[in-house]
Amino acid sequence: MVSMKGIYKGELRTEVTHLKSGNTIVTDAPPDNNGKGEAFSPTDLTCASLNSCMMTLMGILARREEINLEGLTSEIVKVMAADPRRVAEIQITFTHNNLVATDIQKEKLKRAALTCPVALSLSAELKQTVVFNF
């Protein structure tokens, strides 16, 4: 069953629509790859997808453990490599300054993040550096 549709808009811009919700994502090629950089690049979305998947899995665990995860933030760094051009590393730092959780629960949150479906789907050659500040 088709869940998304995409269209090439020209000028290195694409648009993908989520059919159930109608939400759209626009991408542009980055300036260092002949684009305008006016939107997320496809490689930016790879990093954002990993981040969102990790947050979602931590949210599922937090709900089950009755942990208030609201206020969790992240910073994402994409490291590109050349020849071939690819994402070589994704660095994500999660921070929650007021997390109320036991040490065991914090370890469960970390494990949930590191074993999310996107993390497990990416190439083993893509380095995932994840820091948890909580």
Image (tube, helix red, strand yellow):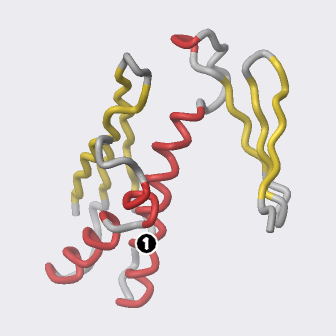
> Residue 16 occupies which quadrant of the picture?
top right
* Residue at (35, 89) in percent of width and height: 65
Instruction: Pick whichever, 100 or 105, lies toward us.
Output: 105
Q: Position of residue 79 (x, y in %)?
A: 34, 29
> Residue 77 occupies which quadrant of the picture?
top left
**Is residue 9 toward the left or the right of residue 98 in the image?**
right
* Residue at (66, 14) in percent of width and height: 36
Q: How many marks?
A: 1
Q: Position of residue 126 (x, y in %)?
A: 32, 41
Q: Position of residue 93 (x, y in %)?
A: 29, 48
* Residue at (30, 49) in percent of width and height: 124
Q: Is residue 15 above or below residue 60?
A: above
Query: What residue is disc 1 on?
Result: 57
Mark 1, residues whose alpha carbon is within 10 Å: few (<14), some, or many (≥20)?
many
Furthest-left residue in view?
103
> Residue 100 occupies which quadrant of the picture?
bottom left
* Residue at (64, 14) in percent of width and height: 35
Instruction: Pick whichever, 102 or 97, lies toward us.
Output: 102
Amino acid found under the numbered disc labelled 1: Leu
Is label 1 in a helix, a strand or a loop?
Answer: helix
Q: Is residue 1 above or below residue 130?
A: below
Quarter of the figure that contains the C terminus = bottom left
Quarter of the figure that contains the N terminus = bottom right
Q: Is residue 111 above or below residue 11?
A: below
